[in-house]
């Protein structure tokens, strides 16, 4: 049996600060806005906040390009605001998890400004530099995630530096012990402030070997993480989660098996890329495969049981809104959102709620490209138009999968700018904020918010906590084209979740005797397991007799 940890029962709420709540009147969300809304989050029941980067940054990639790890970007506030946020959150039993971006820095970071000066500068080796190829071009054909080559020529020293993301995000050289030392020191600076851990951005890239064209899961990755654990967070009782796009269950165990002293858990994205084109990725979406979807989620549930830990999520700042992506965000928006919540929160692992998910916020459908802000979206639009995509194809892909779907400001009420700001917001609001907002959700006892609240409470504070957090998982009806059903069971309890993942009414038969109905997403119901009729997107959690 795995040693029990506080974060096994926790529910994490991700805040994208820029879009959460503006108190300064500059149209950008800030730390004081988060402090103002802590009681709302307490009411929801979450006990961890994952805070997307608030460090000092030129904001080329909305804060994922850090110029000072130990200072706060002025648009978000001051270090005093940050200290107050940690203190006020802790007072409510909520821990702050910082987003840690250590694969790369901003090109305005003092280390890089020094590194650029000359080949023999003491900071030169903090980054990855190579001579041009024999023909004077790039050292090799590795590409940037944001399109184009991963190498940028520096006139001053006649060498190329490496950047897996924007050219304004040069990659750190993790083979340099000084880089490791500096990063560990910086992490301890935050840990000593009383934070609850780190979410580690693209952490699977730090073991890269560029000359061998290895970027993800390099051979040095796990030794580097073990060193990091030993030098920093392993000395504290904190949550650490790594963003690992290429992880398989076997790889995830390497990160999250407690015996290995690396991370608490990882984000894997196998389910999140199920409707992406194998070559063209998310910019040419393919058909959603429901059977494969069930198979993937179930594989992760059973493979990690007892040997690692799952992070459970539908949404984040990089992914479209789940209710629009695979649900029905029109006539069945409420039912769909509750269905997705139930499926996820009853699984084994730590659930993550992305801001606005708890009120069923939807993708945005801006008509003009100019209304979008995201660096990736704009870059890929330009590149794919050159490749022969039509404007219509690209806009359709952006509406489905663009990152700004997740980044439109939080919808607090139906007043001007949804209560987010009294200025012009940095990114336009989704026009549906007059119908979908926190104020309405709090007042309506049947809202998506209250459904999330019940699910979070089930996991944390009830007789069902133990079976939900640690019980075995068994998928039922794997070949059923409409139904997602599974069992969670331990020595004392047996739960059955049944979800109709379609717009049709269907009838199915299940074994067992119903002890009680724990939660449903429809108000009126009469359930017989032997002939269970389920309306569109209807989802029920039963306790069965043992």
Image (cartoon, grey):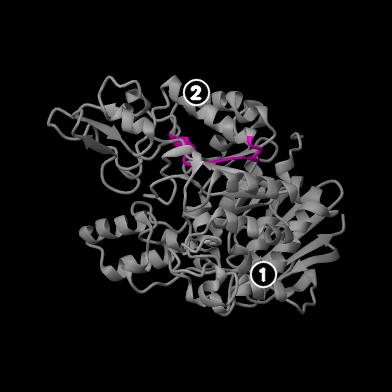
Camera-nearest label, 1 or 2: 2
Tell me the number on the disc at residue 94.
Answer: none
Residue 219: x %, y % from top left = 45, 26
Residue at 28% x, 30% y: name it: 116
Q: Is residue 487 visible?
A: yes
Residue 251: x %, y % from top left = 54, 35
Say what secondary structure mark 1 lies in. helix
Residue 366: x %, y % from top left = 39, 72
Looking at the figure, which quarter contains the N terminus? top right
Residue at 47% x, 50% y: name it: 74
Magenta segment: 193-205
Vertical comparison of 522 with 93: above or below: below
Tell me the number on the disc at residue 448.
Answer: 1
Instruction: Give the left or right position of residue 362, taking residue 306 as reference.
Output: left
Say what secondary structure mark 2 lies in. helix
Hey, which quadrant is residue 355 in on the image? bottom right
Vertical comparison of 126 with 472: above or below: above
Residue at 55% x, 23% y: name it: 227
Instruction: Report the residue marked by disc 2.
Output: 181
Badge 1: residue crowd in 10 Å (few <14, some 14–19, many ≥20): many
Q: Is residue 288 visible?
A: no
Q: Earlier in the sequence, mark 1 or mark 2?
A: 2
Residue 374 on the magenta span: no
Residue 202 on the magenta span: yes
């Amino acid at each position: 049996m795995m040693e029990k940890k506080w974060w096994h029962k926790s529910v994490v709420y991700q805040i994208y600060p820029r879009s959460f709540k503006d108190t300064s009147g500059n149209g950008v969300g800030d730390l004081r806005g988060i402090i103002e809304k802590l009681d709302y989050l307490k009411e929801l029941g979450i006990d961890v906040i994952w805070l997307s980067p608030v460090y000092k940054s030129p904001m080329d990639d909305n804060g994922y390009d850090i110029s000072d790890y130990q200072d706060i970007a002025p648009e978000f506030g001051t270090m005093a605001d940050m200290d107050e946020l940690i203190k006020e959150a802790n007072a409510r039993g909520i821990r702050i998890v910082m987003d840690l971006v250590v694969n790369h820095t901003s090109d305005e970071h003092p280390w890089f400004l020094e590194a650029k000066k000359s080949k023999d500068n003491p900071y030169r080796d903090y980054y990855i530099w190579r001579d041009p190829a024999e023909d004077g071009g790039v050292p090799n054909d590795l590409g940037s995630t944001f399109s184009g080559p991963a190498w940028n020529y520096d006139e001053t020293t006649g060498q190329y530096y490496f950047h897996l993301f924007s050219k304004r995000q040069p990659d750190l050289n993790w083979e340099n012990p000084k880089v490791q030392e500096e990063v560990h020191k910086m992490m301890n600076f935050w840990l000593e402030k009383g934070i609850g851990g780190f979410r580690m951005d693209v952490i699977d890239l730090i073991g890269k070997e560029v000359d061998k064209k290895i970027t993800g899961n390099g051979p040095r990755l796990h030794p580097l993480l073990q060193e990091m654990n030993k030098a920093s967070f392993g000395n504290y009782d904190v949550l650490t989660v790594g963003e690992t796009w290429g992880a398989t269950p076997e790889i995830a165990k390497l990160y999250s098996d407690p015996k290995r002293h690396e991370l608490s858990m990882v984000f894997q994205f196998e389910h999140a890329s199920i409707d992406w084109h194998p070559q063209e990725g998310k910019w040419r979406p393919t058909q959603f495969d429901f059977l494969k979807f069930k198979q993937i989620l179930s594989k992760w549930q059973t493979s990690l049981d007892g040997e690692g830990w799952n992070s459970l999520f539908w949404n984040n700042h990089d992914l479209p809104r789940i209710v629009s992506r695979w649900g029905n965000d029109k006539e069945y928006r409420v039912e769909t959102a509750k269905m997705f919540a139930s499926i996820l929160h009853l699984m084994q692992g730590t659930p993550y709620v992305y801001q606005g998910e708890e009120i069923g916020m939807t993708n945005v459908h801006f008509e003009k490209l100019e209304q979008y802000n995201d660096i990736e979206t704009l870059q890929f639009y330009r590149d794919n138009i050159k490749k022969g995509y039509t404007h219509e194809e690209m806009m359709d892909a952006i509406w489905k999968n663009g990152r700004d779907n997740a980044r439109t400001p939080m919808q607090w009420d139906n007043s001007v700018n949804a209560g987010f700001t009294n200025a012009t917001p940095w990114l336009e609001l989704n026009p549906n904020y007059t119908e979908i907002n926190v104020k309405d959700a709090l007042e309506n006892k049947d809202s998506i918010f209250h459904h999330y609240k019940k699910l979070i409470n089930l996991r944390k504070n009830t007789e069902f906590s133990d079976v939900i957090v640690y019980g075995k998982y068994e998928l039922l009806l794997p070949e059923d084209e409409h139904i997602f059903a599974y069992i969670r069971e331990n020595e004392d309890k047996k739960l059955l979740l049944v979800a109709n993942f379609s717009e049709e009414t269907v009838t199915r038969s299940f074994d067992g005797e119903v002890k009680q109905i724990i939660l449903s997403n429809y108000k009126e119901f009469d359930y017989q397991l032997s002939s269970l009729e389920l309306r569109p997107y209807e989802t029920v959690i039963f306790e069965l007799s043992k």
